[in-house]
Image: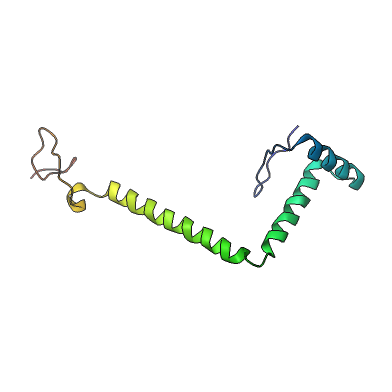
Amino acid sequence: MTEPTKPGHKTLGIKLPSGLHAQLDLIAKVEGVTLGSALLAAAELYVETKRSAPDFAVRAEAVIAQAEAEAAAARQAVNALLAPQAEAGAPTHEEPGRAPGRRRGELTT
């Protein structure tokens, strides 16, 4: 049975090779902890090991820079998509029955 997700926590399902699962399960039993607690400890150790690697900060900054560049490109695409066509420099396609240059919902006086 799975535990309810606590605020600030994520649930992660992973596939382990049978032999690794058996070893981890044995370690958890020997240590008197749940399998979930053992996996959490393993994840914390992995994160700390990576964090202290000499080149990790440089590689992490490169990943962040790439994500920011992708976000900027997506933002630019959305802005271009949502900009009024006349402002975007694209040809306008007037709807039938609407006066040229008038936007939908715009009242005439």
**At 33% across and 50% down in the image, what residue appears?**
77
**At 89% across and 42% down in the image, what residue appears?**
29
Q: Is residue 86 left or right of residue 52?
A: left
Q: Quadrant of the N terminus?
A: top right
- Colour logic: rainbow
Q: Is residue 76 left or right of residue 24?
A: left
**At 84% across and 41% down in the image, what residue appears?**
23
Seen from this angle, which residue lies furthest right? 30
Q: Is residue 23 placed above or below 71 in the rendered structure?
A: above
State the image coordinates of residue 95 (x, y, percent, origin top left). 14, 35
Q: Is residue 65 placed above or below 29 in the rendered structure?
A: below
Q: Is residue 77 left or right of residue 13?
A: left
State the image coordinates of residue 78 (x, y, percent, origin top left). 34, 49
Q: Is residue 23 placed above or below 41 in the rendered structure?
A: above
**At 11% across and 37% down in the image, what residue appears?**
98
Quick one: 36 or 84, which is closer to the camera? Answer: 36
Residue 76 image-quadrant placement? bottom left
